[in-house]
Amino acid sequence: MTDRFLDYLAREHARLEDEIRLESRRPRPDEILIARLKKLKLALKDQMQSWTSDHASSDRQTA
């Protein structure tokens, strides 16, 4: 994966955060939708952390 992919994941993470914020502000927020969005956001965060740790370990191996 490339840095562009990591940038995409970060943008998607921010987009989900905005969507959660907007839904939470509604008079009657959809709690199920918010829970789904939070799970997606967490999965993206896990994927970003995994990518950065894999990338860092491969950098150490080539150094």
Image (cartoon, rainbow, N blue to C red):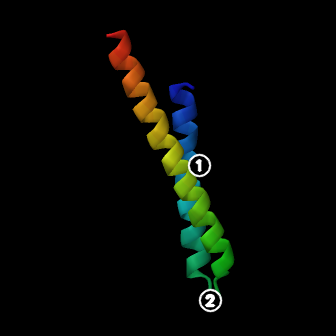
Label 2 CA crowd tier, 10 Å (few <14, some 14–19, many 20+): few
Which residue is rendered at x = 62% and y = 75% of the image? 23
| Position of the N terminus by quadrant | top right
Which residue type carries mark 1? Glu
Q: Measured from the top left, where is residue 45 in percent x and y?
A: 49, 50
Q: Measured from the top left, where is residue 4 in percent x and y?
A: 55, 29
Look at the numbered disc 2 and give the secondary structure of its residue.
loop
| Position of the C terminus by quadrant | top left
Left or right: residue 33 compared with residue 59: right
Q: Quadrant of residue 34?
A: bottom right
Q: Measured from the top left, where is residue 44 in percent x and y?
A: 55, 49
Q: Nearer the viewer, residue 57 or 17?
A: 57
Q: Measured from the top left, where is residue 6 in percent x and y?
A: 52, 35
Q: Earlier in the sequence, mark 2 or mark 1?
A: 1
Marks 2 and 1 in Cβ contact (< 8 Å): no
Label 1 CA crowd tier, 10 Å (few <14, some 14–19, many 20+): some
Residue topped by disc 1: 12
